[in-house]
Image (spheres, rainbow, N blue to C red):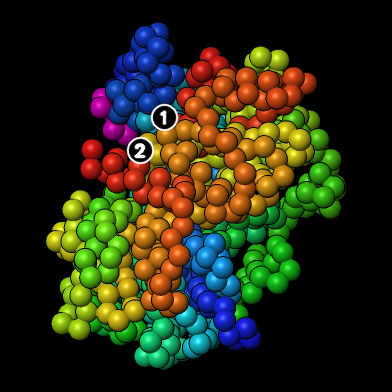
């Protein structure tokens, strides 16, 4: 990477300066502004920075930041890894990440679903890692059927090795565009966006999870090499070896991310046992799953941006004794439309104490009232804690499920915890 | 359909194709507002591989992306159950993509017209721009519903034929054509207010119930009324 042309070198230097300026002035973590400045100077910069590396691009509706982190953690076995671990997942963020680490041969880039075709073309990655597709921020995002189709077409035009979740019909259909794929049975809890065949539209036969097949055109779940086994908290390798996970990140969603990471790391030549060992060191990802102790109470932060994410979060809630705070905003980066709240089933919350917060807490209030879930309305986390402590001084834990800007507001209130 | 004859039968059409963003909310609110008044309900979910039962009271159709919309229209036309139910006088509440396909025609992927189910005299085409955002409209005073609010997200534009009437006059947002929003003809009612249109407008939910069971006992204002007022104020601010 030292043979980067002069113009590209200049562009990266300028980009890095802008990024440090952004950090120094406290305006951000520098991932976006740096790339933006650099791109002005050299439009082909991403291609040039990617050249000669072994890159994995990671995309999905949910779990892409976490999985990117898991894969890069595994690859650090070989030394430095260029990665956009702050979640700046558009080309400007990719440029900043690659420019910041020119000597790293291995790179893992989280890629926004919509930008994936463009970034595949620009970087010619060794691997493309695909996990799930579901409804998300429909006022500004692309329709997911259209998205899957673009992925499929782009993959058909490249010789990239795809590592993909066979249990998600839309993802599998996209991945089948590639001639070279490793299939992983990574599970799929949210099925509301995949009852119909991505190829012909017929109602899919989904009798025994995770199998699916189309009764009309014959499209079917590909045979998988890797699998997650949630019941035994383990993954199964292509050789049939069962490896216990014992992660420090909660829930089936993270077991699913882990099996994808293990399959990807194995493609780079790392033994899955070693990968799993390294994954256990991760306890939070950019504030997700982190716990803050405040007023003597452990407050756990769960980020969930869409119905599939909320469903996964409900599954990792602590036992019913632990109260939960639900917080929803509808700013541009959340999606301005809160309709998705009606796609989630809240009845599992009936036996715990529930608080609603955020700019759209009235939407949540009506939603919970409709599902006959008792709740209380709150303004701030501190206020909830004070109330809980007054009622039950021995309270030790609270879970918070929040969508994007609501999550960031709470996280910022506790000093941008990682 | 097996049920006691007194229950209000709510038929949710093709949740596997036409349930893109919160459409379930309309089923839940209709059921809840009926049950709060002591009216028993029965909800039937009909997948696109099943035939549509003809003896329902209220048929609900939600939104969908282009391809699912076309598939849903083709299957509904081939099945014929919804058209027979509407001819019998059943109530049909159709939202967004569902609204377009219950009309005479709607725009296919390339914009050319495709035949709809034909139970309401409307024709939909494709507009120049996508209509996305909060929408506010005043419903035809004959319906006693007042002002409604919701979120629209569509490329369609809809012309109302002589058999149908516009549901409302647009105050904010695009709706059918910048002037009117939605349409109704008998008890077939459609709107571009997508997803949970009934949760956000309890008085619209009550209109559908009134059509089926006659006069309703009033309910004390609760979170639905509060959300309605809050969103109305926010949209017009």
**Where's residue A47, x and y in %?**
39, 36
Q: In this view, does B9 lie above or below A167?
A: below
Give the vertical position of A215 relative to A66 (above or below): below
Q: Which mark is residue A93?
A: 1
Question: For the C terminus of chain B, which image quadrant?
Answer: top left
Q: In which quarter of the image is residue B68?
A: bottom left
Label number found at residue A292: none
Q: What range is drawn magenta here?
A: A40-44
| Residue situated in front as seen by the camera: A349 or A95 | A349
| Mark number displayed over residue A332 | 2
Q: Which chain carries label 2?
A: A
Indicate the position of residue A330 as horizontal and vertical percent values: 40, 39
User: Could you tell me which residue is drawn at 58 percent across and 85 percent down?
Assistant: B5
Q: Residue A412: x, y in percent?
A: 50, 19
| Point 57% across, 78% down: residue | B7
Chain letter for mark 1: A
């Amino acid at each position: 990477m030292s043979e980067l042309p002069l113009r590209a070198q200049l562009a990266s230097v300028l980009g890095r300066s802008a990024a440090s300026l952004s950090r120094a002035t406290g305006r951000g973590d520098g991932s976006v502004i740096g790339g933006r400045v650099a791109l002005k100077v050299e439009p082909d910069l991403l291609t040039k920075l990617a050249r000669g590396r072994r890159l994995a691009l990671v995309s999905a509706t949910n779990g892409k930041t976490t999985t990117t982190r898991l894969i890069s953690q595994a690859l650090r076995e070989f030394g430095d890894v260029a990665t956009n671990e702050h979640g700046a997942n558009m080309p400007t963020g990719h440029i900043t990440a690659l420019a910041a680490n020119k000597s790293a041969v291995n790179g893992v880039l989280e890629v926004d679903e919509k930008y994936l075709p463009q970034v595949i073309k620009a970087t010619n990655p060794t691997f493309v890692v695909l996990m799930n597709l579901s409804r998300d921020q429909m006022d500004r995002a692309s329709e997911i059927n259209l998205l899957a189709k673009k992925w499929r077409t782009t993959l058909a035009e490249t010789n990239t090795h795809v590592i993909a979740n066979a249990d998600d019909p839309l993802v599998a259909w996209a991945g089948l565009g590639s001639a070279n794929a490793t299939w992983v049975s990574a599970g799929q809890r949210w099925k509301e966006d995949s009852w119909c065949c991505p190829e012909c539209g017929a109602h899919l036969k989904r009798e025994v999870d995770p199998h699916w097949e189309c009764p009309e055109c014959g499209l079917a779940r590909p045979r998988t090499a890797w699998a997650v086994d949630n019941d035994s908290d383990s993954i199964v390798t292509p050789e049939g070896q069962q490896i216990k996970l014992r992660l420090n990140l909660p829930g089936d969603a993270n077991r699913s991310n882990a099996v994808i990471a293990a399959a990807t790391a194995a493609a780079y030549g790392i033994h899955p046992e070693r990968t799993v060992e390294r994954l256990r060191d991760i306890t939070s990802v950019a504030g997700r799953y982190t716990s803050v102790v405040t007023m003597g109470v452990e407050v756990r932060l769960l980020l969930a941006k869409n119905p599939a994410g909320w469903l996964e979060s409900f599954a990792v809630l602590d036992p019913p004794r632990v109260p939960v705070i639900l917080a929803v905003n509808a700013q541009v980066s959340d999606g301005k439309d809160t309709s998705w709240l009606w796609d989630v089933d809240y009845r599992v919350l009936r036996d715990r104490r529930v608080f609603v917060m955020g700019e759209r807490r009235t939407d949540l209030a009506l939603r919970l009232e409709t599902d006959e879930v008792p709740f209380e309305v709150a303004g701030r986390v501190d206020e909830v804690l004070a109330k809980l402590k007054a009622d039950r001084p021995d309270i030790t834990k609270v879970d918070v499920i929040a969508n994007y800007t609501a999550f960031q507001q709470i996280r910022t209130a506790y000093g941008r915890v990682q | 359909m097996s049920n006691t004859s007194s229950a209000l039968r709510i038929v949710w059409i093709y949740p596997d194709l036409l349930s893109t963003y919160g459409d379930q909310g309309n089923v839940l609110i209709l059921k809840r507002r009926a049950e709060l008044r002591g009216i028993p309900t029965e909800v039937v979910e009909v997948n696109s591989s099943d035939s549509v039962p003809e003896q329902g009271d209220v048929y609900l159709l939600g939104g969908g992306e282009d391809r699912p919309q076309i598939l849903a229209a083709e299957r509904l036309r081939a099945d014929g159950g919804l058209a027979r139910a509407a001819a019998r006088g059943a109530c049909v509440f159709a939202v967004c993509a569902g609204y377009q396909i219950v009309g005479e025609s709607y725009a296919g992927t390339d914009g050319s017209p495709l035949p709809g189910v034909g139970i309401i005299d409307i024709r939909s085409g494709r507009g120049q721009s996508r209509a996305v955002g909060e929408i506010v409209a005043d419903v035809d005073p004959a319906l006693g519903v007042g002002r409604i609010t919701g979120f629209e997200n569509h490329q369609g534009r809809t012309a109302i034929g002589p058999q149908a009437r516009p549901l409302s006059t647009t105050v904010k947002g695009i709706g059918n054509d910048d002037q009117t929003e939605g349409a109704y003809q008998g008890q077939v009612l459609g709107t571009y207010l997508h997803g949970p249109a009934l949760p956000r407008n309890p008085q619209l939910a009550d209109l559908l119930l009134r059509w089926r069971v006659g006069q309703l006992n009033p309910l004390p204002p609760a979170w639905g009324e509060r959300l309605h007022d809050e969103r109305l104020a926010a949209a017009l601010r």
